[in-house]
Amino acid sequence: MKSSTIKSENLKLSVDYIQQAAKKKVELVCFPEFQMVYSPPEQTAKELSTIAENAINGNFISTLRKEAKRHRIKVIATIYENMDTKGKKKIDHRVSDTAIIISDRGDELSIYRKLHLYDALGFKESTKLIGGDKIERPVKVGIGKIGLEICYDIRFPEMSRILTLDGADVLAIPSGWVQGIMKEEHWQIMLKARAIENGCYVIAPDQVGNIFSGRSMVIDPFGITLLDMGNKEGVEVVEIDRDRVESVRKTLPLLKNRRTDVYADHTSSFS
């Protein structure tokens, strides 16, 4: 999707996409990063904080929860989240970049706050965002166990491996991948690498337009591209086969072939 700077427009578009997906008998809808609103580079942290909401009962996520329940469909959504200051005056206006898995009953199954902030290649997300401090455990939905990451997280393969070892069959990676030299190549290569090295599906919806590169993709556990939306907005449907994960991991047993007995002698010395 192409998010605008107006939150109400993006909420309306999100509801429309959920309704479209429900008509296609879809089980899970995955939205990209920055679904709530596009924050242009010149927008300040304070300005963004006035748009951000609570992850549990803010209007944006509450509306999506109602739509998920109404249509009996699961949703992966993203918001800017105002963090709890526990009654103290909010001095640091930075917000969390948060992804949420919503069940088909409207319940929140997982809330993940982006761990790795994009302070690279001329960007500095940490001026407006505050990083999370936890990798959320994968949660069971109909298509398998889903582990959540957000965008820049895919450049850190340790996170994908941790989620996989914790049971993930699918890595869902909502993204707003910024355009730039070699950026689309990096995007495609790393999505395929994370799928191949972990023997899992990778679902990576991405923003289009504004400063973003598009190319929403779904990769299967053997690295086959099942979907590449290019710069297209809208709803596309992909079938996820849990048996495919088991089959690939059996014939290409990378997780079993790891030499953790040797790795342990080295990892503790790195920082």
Image (cartoon, rainbow, N blue to C red):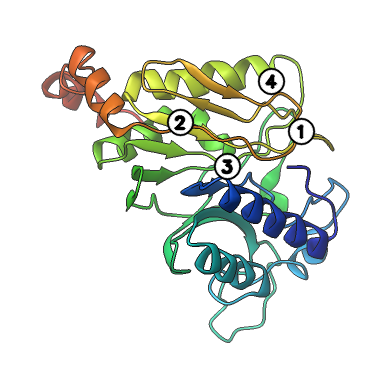
Picture coordinates of residue 26 (x, y %)?
51, 46
Q: Which residue type carries mark 2?
A: Val
Nearer the camera: disc 1 or disc 4: 1
**Residue 174: which disc?**
3
Task: Assess disc 3: are there few (<14), some (14-19) or many (≥20) residues with their C-alpha within 10 Å of its C-alpha.
Answer: many
Circle 1 residues within 10 Å: few <14, some 14–19, many ≥20: some
Q: Is residue 110 above or below residue 152?
A: below
- Tell me which residue sits at (67%, 77%) in the image: 90
**Nearer mark to the viewer, of 2 and 4:** 2
The image's mark for residue 183 is 4
Q: Amino acid at mark 1?
A: Phe
Earlier-in-chain disc, 2 versus 4: 4
Rendered residue at 24%/32% (across/down)? 268
Up the image or down, 71 lies above or below 239; here it is below
First in residue order: circle 3 vs circle 1:
3
First along the sequence among labels 3 and 4:
3
Give the label, 1 or 2, closer to the camera.
2
| Secondary structure type for disc 1 | loop
State the residue position of label 1: 212
How many neighbours does mark 4 have within 10 angstroms: few (below 14), some (14-19), or many (20 or more)? some
For label 2, the residue is 202
Q: Is residue 131 left or right of residue 156?
A: right
Q: Front-most of 134 and 190?
A: 190
Mark 2 secondary-structure assignment: strand
Tell me how far mark 1 sits from mark 4, CA to CA: 10 Å
Q: Quadrant of residue 241?
A: top left
Name the amino acid type tagged 4: Lys
Q: Between marks 2 and 3, how big is the CA–CA gap?
A: 10 Å
